[in-house]
Structures are given as C-alpha cells and as structure tokens.
Amino acid sequence: MPQYAEQFNMTSSQYLNTGVNSQYLVPGFIHKVMLVPKDTMITQTQSQSMYATAQAGIANNTDSSRWFPIGNFTAMEDKSSKAVVNTTSIGSFVFIRDGKYHIEFTYMRGGVQLHNKLRKKFHLQQDSWEMLIVDKDTNCFMGTKPALNSSGYVTKGYTLEQIYVEQYDFNNATDEAKFRIGFVFADVDEFNERISIIQVPDSQPLMLLNGLKDLEFQTFPAPYQVLTAAVAKLRVTTGGGATDLYTLYGSALVAITAQFSFRDASGNALTCTITLDATTQTLIFTFSGAAYTALASGAIIDCFSPTITQLIAGSIPGYANTSFQLTK
C-alpha cells in the first residue's frame, strides 16, 4: 500500500471506474481506536505528519481537547444490522434503507482500573466524541471526509450514535473476566461514500500511540491531607497508587518546582518549595510567605502540577497534569 495522506473521495464522478489497482485497502482487525473531541478536523498539512498530529492531540494540556487511544482489543463482535430489502407482492425486491454499523470490543489490558475510567469518561457521552480507527496491518487511520470539505480539512472522526461501556463479566473459572466497550455509528455513508484514509509510514507504528497515565500525589502517611508545620509529604504515583514514581521521576519533578502552582480559595498564589526525602521516598512540600501565614487553620490549598507540555519538557513523558488539595 502506498504512503499517502489524503482522503478517498468516493463521491467524485472523476474516480468511479472499476479497474483495480495493485494497491488497495482491505481493513484488518481493529486493534485500537482513537476517540477525538467532536468536530475535530484534520487538515491536509496535519495529515502529512499524522503521527505527530496524533501525539500532539494525546498530549493536549486541555482535557476536553485531548485525544484518547483505546485499544489492544482481544476480540470484536460485529453487531451491525443488515440493509432492509423488502419483497413486493409480485416478487420484486425494493431497497428500503441501509443497516447500522455497531461494533463491540473486548479488552483485558487495564483491567477494572481502565474499565472504571472508561465508564466515567465515555459511557453514553457520544455527543462529545468522534472516532478514528487504527488499522494495524496497514498502519493507517480510517476516518471520514467532512460533509462540507472547506478550509483544507480532509478528515474527521466517525460520528457516533452511542458509546457504551458494559458492566464487566466475572471470571467463571473457565473464562477470564471480560471488559467491553461498544460503539454505534450514526452514518454508514461515512464508512462508504465518504471514507478517508491517512497512511502513516511504517517507521511510526500507530500501535505505539498510547493514552496518558494519571500522575497522582498522595499524602504520606495516607490518607491525611493536613499540613504539619507548613509541611506535607507526598508520594508521587500512578495507577491508583499501585506504581510509585519516586525513583523514576522524583528528581525531575523537583527540577520543575517552579512550574507547580499553589492557590488559596480566593485564588491568591502561595509560595511552596519541593525537596526530596530519600528515607520515605516522598516529595516534601514546604509552604512559606505572608499569604500562607495569613490562612486560617483548616483552609484549603489548591495545588496544580505542571502542564503536560511542561512535564514532557522536564523529561516526564506520558503523564497527564493533575491537581490535588491540601489543608492547612
């Protein structure tokens, strides 16, 4: 298959002859999808460096503008309905309407933790998202040509009629627990007459595009969030505290201390320094200054980590920015 970064415009009468080229696409098993914010439009220029475009979408500092890869699917069930063709009283066939595309994926990797996040973020939220399909075999994105192809836009995600994340199936001593996410698509024309394919070089495998992990700050000892003598000791973790990141990124986080921000309930900036405690393998947050001193006991302090862009620049790639609260 050639490398190209353009849409197939199947509606153009200029390209409707039936001779078969030596290069063509037969979609393979869908190992991964990319959920993108609704009405995300990809330009011709962006499509020509699509791997970088996707990386930038995944690392967007704004959650509502971020792209979310979901994948390493282990199975897919095609629940699509067929076209409706009626038979008349004299035996003629009449095409009534197309069917509806409906696919359901099974995933194992990520377990209940990922399942929990997918239900909270995407379940029945189809009005906020569209989907690009990742074809692993040909290393391309599949989407659709915008109905009104203006301003240089060549591709958008498929319109979704429904996203649902089912309750998971228990392990029954024969089969493992199973997790499923399903998608019903709004318009079959988007897959057929208006299909759009963006080829990516094989040197940039799309299966390596993964979602961000959550960066989490937990007080030590947990779960008390109250400062002691203006000091809080925090563990830096991911995966609900399952993976401690002190050794990997403790020093890197201290190096970008200036890019943390701390504010009181009125939005006033507070001064805080961050150091390492090798004994407890925690980050020590020490507050000082007049604005902190003026806070009443029990006052809430809002704490904000560096942005995704700042984390990447500080050699902490693959993690999302976060916020947490402390109490004076």
Image (cartoon, rainbow, N blue to C red):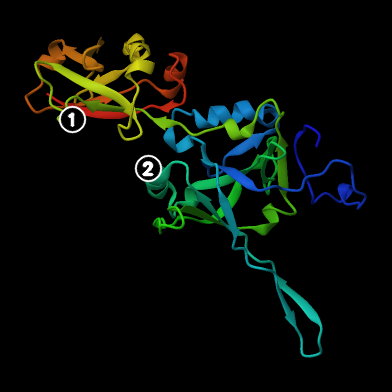
The one of 247 and 89 positioned closer to us in this rendering: 247
Q: Residue 11's x, y, as percent?
A: 79, 51
* Disc 2 packing (10 Å; few <14; some 14–19; many ≥20): few
Instruction: Identify residue type, mark 1.
Output: Ala
Q: Is residue 157 above or below residue 291?
A: below
The one of 252 and 185 positioned closer to us in this rendering: 252
Dot placed on the residue nearer the N-terminal end, 1 or 2: 2
Judging by the rendered image, the residue that carries numbered circle 2 is 113
Q: Residue 128's x, y, as percent?
A: 48, 47
Residue 166, numbered circle: none
Residue at 40% x, 59% y: name it: 172
Question: Hey, which quadrant is residue 232 in on the image?
Answer: top left
Residue at 44% x, 48% y: name it: 122
Judging by the rendered image, the residue that carries numbered circle 1 is 222
Q: Residue 157's x, y, as percent?
A: 61, 45
Q: Secondary structure at mark 2?
A: helix
